[in-house]
Image (tube, helix red, strand yellow):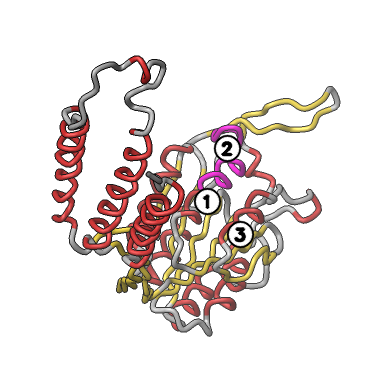
Amino acid sequence: MIIAFQNPGLVWFFLSIPVLLVVYIYYSRNRFGTLRFSSLLMFEGISNTSGMWRKHVLYALRLLAIMAIFIALMRPQERNALQEINAEGIDIMMVIDISGSMRAMDFKPNRLEAVKKVAQSFVSERQNDRIGLNVFARESFLQCPLTTDLNRLNEFISGIEIVNEKYDGTAIGMALAGAVNRLRDSDAKSKVIVLLSDGRNNAGELDPITTSDLAKEFGIRIYTIGAGTRGTAAMPVQTAIGVRNVQVQVDVDEETLTRIADITGGKYFRATDEKSLAEIYQEISKMETTEYSVKEYVQHAELFYYPILAALFFLIAEFVLERLVFRRFP
């Protein structure tokens, strides 16, 4: 709610208030009685201003009434702005690898935790889109269907954990198939999959390239991200003497991820640390912009009758005080 004035230029009327005060003070101090007395002994102990406070009260009420009238003339209004947003949103499925290799420590504190942090930031910036989440290792798991409740989605992202060893593996084809299945019937102007993996497809019944061809048929664009440094990365491994960090070969299938993106009109990115990963998600966000138009409507509610009622109250109070309460009898 915003309070505004239709005639703000009339605020200059208030400059007359100090003038009226100065005039009143001047005449109050220079007003003398016309009766003469041979002696003032009979008036000793009586203040010559004992009744002036009544006049001050009456004049103050009159000034308040004048100020209220000035405010009414300025036409105060309550303005409420309403926005009508017509958005052509995008449906996005995020697909994140949760295989054992996501424990690698080339990202801090590890790959999965870095991905979760960046993914949550990406989600928070897509306020007009529907976003869902698939995770995968040897099998694909739907964590969250397409939703506009992005706070709830970020809670699901926060809860992602590395898969148990018996389910370890990398089924990229199955993960893409699950995401395509969620997007194929969407009527959004744009349908997008953002796939992140740090390995090679070594599980599942579906080939990633075949699934990409299917995605293309449904008008789905796939952006792929290969996560991991080039060469080797430290990996925590359980040994007989406890957990030790062992250097392992980073094995990102860049060729397959690039083909997936090319087939569907997307793009492949390589993230070698958390900074580059954040920059990649930001670049994807810029490439997939949501178009929307905003119409603003402003409602006006007149409030001038409030100062009018206040002025009437002050004038009535002045009349009652002058005629009844402060009335002087000869």
Mark 3 belongs to which amino acid?
Leu
Front-lying residue, 20 or 134: 20
Horizontal side of 110 relative to 19 (left or right) equals right
Q: Nearer the viewer, mark 2 or mark 1?
A: 1
Q: Determine the residue positioned at 15% across, 37% down.
A: 23
Q: To which quarter of the image does residue 90 belong?
A: bottom left
Location of residue 31 by image quarter: top left
Tag 3 secondary structure: helix
Secondary structure under badge 2? strand
Magenta stretch holds residue 265: no
The disc label shown at residue 119, or none = 1
Which of pointers 2 and 1 lies earlier in the amino acid sequence?
A: 1
Could you tell me which residue is drawn at 30 percent across and 17 percent down?
A: 40
- Distance of mark 1 from mark 3, alpha carbons? 10 Å
Give the mark nearer the N terminus: 2 vs 3: 3
Magenta segment: 105-119
How crowded is the residue under tag 2: few (<14 C-alpha within 10 Å), some, or many (20+)? Answer: some
Q: Which residue matches tag 3?
A: 153
Q: Mark 1 belongs to which amino acid?
A: Ala
